[in-house]
């Protein structure tokens, strides 16, 4: 193989590795999630019961629902996150489709980063309180009951991203 070709391949691999963003810092995570309270800071403008059009005023595209009444929008204001999923449900009384909860999906590249997971877990324990299941951290399924509903951080394994599902204030 030509030395020039080998050099070009090596340079492109090095550039691709350098182009991957560094994991979010603790300050980045705290700004996204908030350090106290049950609401996620990045979702603070969303309220349970909002109509899709109202949610779209906060996150453009939040009114583009799939057949299951979920909307996926590009994450903004949350370092390390790639997507926000907004989950809507049909109101039993009015029949309207209304916002129920939100999910932050983090970059897949962070799933294998144990330091990121430890820091994220520490921030969530500070925010929501201690875990009742001692094996939850090892299983990577952390669940808290809050006054607003259930908050959960989970992943299906190293090839799937972390997802943080959180209730919204009414």
Image: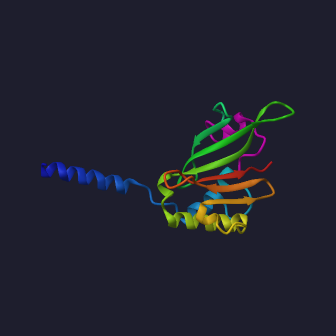
Q: Position of residue 61 (x, y in %)?
A: 61, 36
Q: Is residue 49 above or below residue 14?
A: above
Asked whether the viewer can see residue 40, the reply is no
Residue 93 occupies which quadrant of the picture? Answer: top right
Horizontal side, residue 87 vs residue 81: left or right: right
Q: Position of residue 101 (x, y in %)?
A: 71, 46
Q: Is residue 116 above or below residue 157?
A: below
Q: Position of residue 36 (x, y in %)?
A: 71, 64
Q: Nearer the viewer, residue 111 or 122?
A: 111
Q: Is residue 82 magenta?
A: no
Q: Determine the main secondary structure of the stretch shown in magenta.
A: loop
- Span of residues in magenta: 44-62
Q: Position of residue 67 (x, y in %)?
A: 65, 30
What residue is shown at x 53% (from left), y 54% (from top)?
Answer: 157
Q: Nearer the viewer, residue 144 or 99?
A: 144
What residue is shown at x 75% (from left), y 36% (from top)?
Answer: 51
What residue is shown at x 74% (from left), y 49% (from top)?
Answer: 168
Asked whether the viewer can see residue 120, the reply is yes
Residue 94 occupies which quadrant of the picture? Answer: top right
The residue most toward the right is 93
């Amino acid at each position: 193989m030509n030395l020039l070709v080998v050099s070009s391949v090596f340079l492109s691999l090095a550039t691709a590795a350098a182009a991957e963003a560094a994991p979010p810092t603790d300050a980045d995570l705290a700004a996204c999630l908030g350090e106290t309270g049950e609401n996620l800071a990045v979702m603070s403008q969303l309220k349970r019961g909002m109509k899709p059009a109202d949610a779209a005023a906060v996150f453009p595209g939040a009114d583009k629902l799939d057949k299951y009444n979920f909307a996926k929008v590009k994450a903004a204001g949350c370092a390390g996150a790639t997507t926000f999923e907004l989950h809507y449900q049909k109101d039993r009384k009015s029949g309207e489709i209304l916002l129920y909860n939100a999910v932050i999906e983090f970059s897949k590249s962070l799933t294998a980063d144990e330091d990121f997971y430890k820091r994220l877990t520490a921030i969530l324990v500070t925010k929501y309180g201690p875990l009742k299941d001692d094996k939850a951290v090892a299983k990577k399924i952390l669940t808290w009951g809050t006054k607003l509903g259930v908050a959960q951080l989970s992943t299906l394994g190293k090839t799937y991203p972390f997802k943080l599902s959180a209730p919204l204030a009414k």
